[in-house]
Amino acid sequence: MNSSPWWNRFGIDQPEPPRGCWEDESTAKLRTTDIFCADHDRLLALNLEKPSAARWVWLTLAALAVFGAFLVAGLSDNHLPVFLVATGLGTLALGLPLRRYTSTWPAVLAYWIGGTLTMAVLAEAPTGAHQVARLVLLALTLLVSGWFLYLKAGVHDQTATTRAVVLPVTLGNAALLACAFVAVNPMTWFPEVGAATLTALVLVGLAGWLLAAVVVLIVGFVDGFPTSVRPVEPLLNRRRPPRRRRASSNIVDQISSTLDLALKFVGYVLGMSGILAVNGVWFVLVVTARRIRITVIHAALRALAAAFAAATALGVTIRAIIAPVSLLTLGGWLALVFARQTRDYLVTDAPAALGWSLATAVGANAVLFAAWALLVTGGDRDRAEPLRSAAESAKIVVSYWLLLQVVGGWLVGLPALLGYGNVRVGWFTYGCSAVLVGAFALNQIQRARAAADEHAVEPGTSH
């Protein structure tokens, strides 16, 4: 069992091994994201053991509750019951493929359920509440993404320098992104923010980058300080000391020679002092320049290591946090639109409402698939495996959905047939019923032909 922190496993979580249904426990054909048994089309989550009669009773009651939600939505002209059903179905669409990823599915379902229910509460709220909610979502997404990026960067490169550099840069970038979103404010998604707040966000962003640069330079200096510096060649060569010129025994000539030597010595001392001063300054400048070069090189190496760790972590953060959050939010909005359009169809039987209902249902399932597929394709895993698994599951789901649609459509429309309510059996239910009857008849014809062909080739059969 992997005991590393959840942020080290989230998005690259190692799944538990798959299990087959109770009749055939073989896992050779199963993927970790498969929902149905490959041979029996059974829902694996409910058929690991042979189902009891009580389980079938509970499933029947759950189906009746779903049908009842549609009936209540039509009778009360309220989309909320359908929205609750859509939220539950979305929970299954996310939880069933991710059930083997124990570090992933709790957070995904918590955000999906909490986000969709919050969206339902805000649906009837004024525009200002919507803007505040979007601003809060933006802030939470940036904070969680930045925190996750910081943790993942520390996992990739466990040096303290990388963490000390990535942290202020992440906070700075989050502040700059928040400032950009709020300043541009596309389609007035967010409330108006004053210039002082925008300025503060810009200053926080610049301060983060400045702090990271200071940290990199300090670490570069500390790393480069033990590096030895080669000897510095003097800029000016030393002068030779003066010599006394030869003089005669004449006392005047002796005094003149002594004075000349004294003057030359004073010049020599002044010259040497200047040479030593110039060479000293030259030494300081050369050593400083070389230290600066060594510091910059070490700082650049540290910065590159931190940038590489941050870039690697950014890819995981986008795939595991930012993109799924965006997709789940979009899926929640589509579920809300689906509930409203379905309510309109139940009340008015309008083809346009039915078309929008089906389109949003397909769109919601597509974005939810994209969300969970991003979370299970980390590392070196097969990117096409979720698509194959979803395609096989979709074929089975469609057949079950068609049957439930026909049964549910007639049950929901039954009270109107008996004179109660206005939710009648619509042309969509009639069409699905015709398709189901046609498919059943075609299957019976094919079975009859297969039986006749088998009987015709039996030994001893007269022709």
Image (spheres, rainbow, N blue to C red):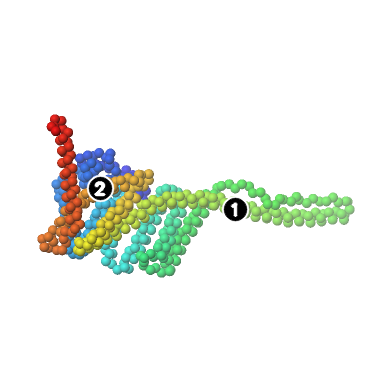
Q: Judge by depth and name the residue closer to the eye, 391 or 225.
A: 391
Label 1 sits on what residue type? Ala
Q: Can residue 80 be seen in this view?
A: no
Against 14, residue 274 (above or below) is below
**Which residue occupies 70% across, 52% down?**
236
Label 2: few (<14), some or many (≥20) within 10 Å? few
The N terminus, quarter of image? top left
Image check: 362 left or right of 205? Answer: left
Residue 51 placement: quadrant: top left
Upstream in the sequence, badge 1 or badge 2?
1
297 shown above or below 449: below
Q: Residue at x 27, y 46 (%)?
A: 392
Marks 1 and 2 sit apart, C-alpha to C-alpha, by 70 Å
Q: Where is residue 400 in the image (x, y as percent from the top left)?
A: 21, 49
Task: Say which quarter of the image contains residue 170.
Answer: bottom left
Percent position of residue 99, x then y: 27, 48
Quick check: 257 left or right of 319? right
Farthest residue, direction right:
250
Instruction: Name the kind of residue labelled 2 in the image.
Output: Lys
Tell me the residue that label 2 is attached to. 395
Q: Residue furthest front?
A: 463
Q: Is mark 1 on a helix, strand or loop?
A: helix
Q: Residue furthest left?
A: 418
- Where disc 2 sits, the SS reads helix
| Direction from residue 266 to residue 131 in the image, left or right | left
